[in-house]
Amino acid sequence: MIRYTIQGGAPLNGTVTVSGAKNAAVAILPATVLVDGVCRIENVPDISDVRLLLKIIQNMGAGIRRLSPNTLEIDGRSVRCVPAPEELAQKIRASYYLIGAQLGRFGRACVALPGGCNFGPRPIDQHVKGFEALGASVEIDSGCVTAETEDGLRGGHVYLDIVSVGATMNIMLAAVLAPGLTVIENCAKEPHIVDLANFLNAMGAKVSGAGTDVIKVRGVSRLTGGSYSIIPDQIEAGTYMAAVAAAGGNVLVQNVIPKHMDCITAKLREMGLSIAEYEESIRVEKTRPLKAAKVKTMPYPGFPTDMQPQIAVCMSLAKGTSMITEGIYDARYRYTAELQRMGANVDVSGKVAVIEGVKSLQGCKVKAYDLRAGAAMVLAGLAAEGETIVENAHYIERGYEDIIGKLTALGAKITRSEVPDLEPAEKTG
Ligand code: EPU
């Protein structure tokens, strides 16, 4: 078990560089299975979810060379259709992208049902609906998804009943090599969806409309390979911005696309943070106490659910009564019990959390329940009086590259240690 120990109260000052986007990388790596050639991918975040996916695609026969810490060369020419090992696939939500990728390349797929952070039920019915519209028969049995076609997929028309990031990307993956035209309507519009489309196009695909609610994919006979650089991580950047809101200080967050940050920047400004935007960076400074705010999480360009726990920490320290309405998941408030143990005043009822700001939080021993909840505990620890111990911090390392190094460089007092396991690792994504 990985444990972080934080001595709170030190403001954050300096520059932090944001890594490549996790939720783009975890779709782009499975997408290399579709490529009958070599992909050179830059700005790949060095996080445990990525390392796990690399193991899975290597097991399928992909040749992987690390050219630098964040640049990979992946050779998909000798990839075979082998089932993703259950013990690996089940650990990560994004293993569902292997279904679309295997189906697209081989006309069949066999992948263990994905896990993922525990936010209540997370069905994949919209992914299945898309695969079926492209001509696949899909069965979910004994924790495994098996998809088959008689003679490969063909273009089709899908209207998503729910705006789903995963389903939008998975259907895109399945469609790129399917002869004919695929139209996906009511798509998600997150920056990582555009990034996946750009990656696929750089490899030879014909995807248009990503970033709008209708995506069209004209099937090509082969993806030949090429070079691509993954976009910066919107949520990692937002987490460092929220860290300044919670702990104070003045930080230049660099390697960001400011447009992707609009929904987060607007809310933090409303709460009193001074924020200046530049071409590829954002300066965040806390010059006055935070004010209460209201947030409803929504699909992009709305406020992201993956920033909900971090903004809750800021609200815990803001003057007045704040309110969060979780618009994506049924149960993403498990972490609030930990926040309350640090002195926060949070009242959760269904999808709504009402947060009465307090003057300060007090350090204590808390658990990371999932990736973003874990990041929120770190933020709370940075802002709190005294020492905070965050247990189960391995969750955090699934999505944040070198968070200890980055925070330490900003003046945070945070250390990492490994101690015997508390409980079996859960799943993420
Ligand atoms: N949904 C369905 N049926 C489906 C698909 C989704 O009912 O077939 C529901 C989900 O249960 C949820 C909503 O639709 O209530 C949206 O789910 P979505 O499919 O958009 O989420 P996801 O693909 O499972 C990805 C990210 C999550 C992020 C969400 C929303 C990955 C690997 N995961 O999950 O990231 O919260 O989109 O933006 O990309 C994280 O990074 O911490 C994380 C949890």
Image: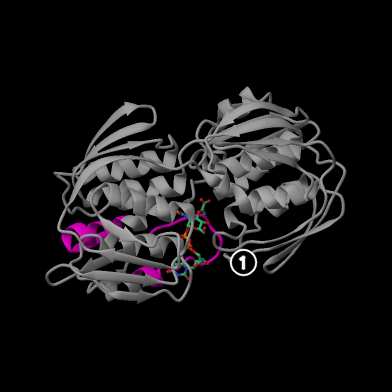
Label 1 beta carbon less than 8 Å to ligand 1: no
In the rendered image, the vertical position of residue 198 relative to residue 393, given as above or below: below
In the rendered image, the vertical position of residue 223 relative to residue 392, given as above or below: below
Which residue is pictured at 52% across the width and 30% down the height? 402
**Number of numbered discs visible in the structure rendering:** 1
Looking at this rendering, what residue extends furthest in the left direction?
151
Left or right of 173 on screen, residue 47:
right
Question: The residue under label 1 is which amino acid type?
Answer: Gly
**The magenta stretch spans residue 281:** no
Q: Position of residue 121 (x, y in %)?
A: 51, 67
Q: Name the residue tied to disc 1.
A: 327
Q: Describe the element under mark 1 as helix, strand or loop.
A: loop
Residue 99 in view here: no
Residue 210 in view here: yes
Left or right of 339 on screen, residue 30:
left
Q: Position of residue 255 (x, y in %)?
A: 52, 35
Left or right of 76 on screen, residue 388:
right
Mark 1 surroundings: few (<14), some (14-19) or many (≥20) residues within 10 A: some
Which segment is the magenta one? 98-127
In the rendered image, the vertical position of residue 116 relative to residue 156, given as above or below: above
Looking at this view, is 288 or 406 the one in front? 288
Which residue is pictured at 38% across the width and 27% down the height? 69
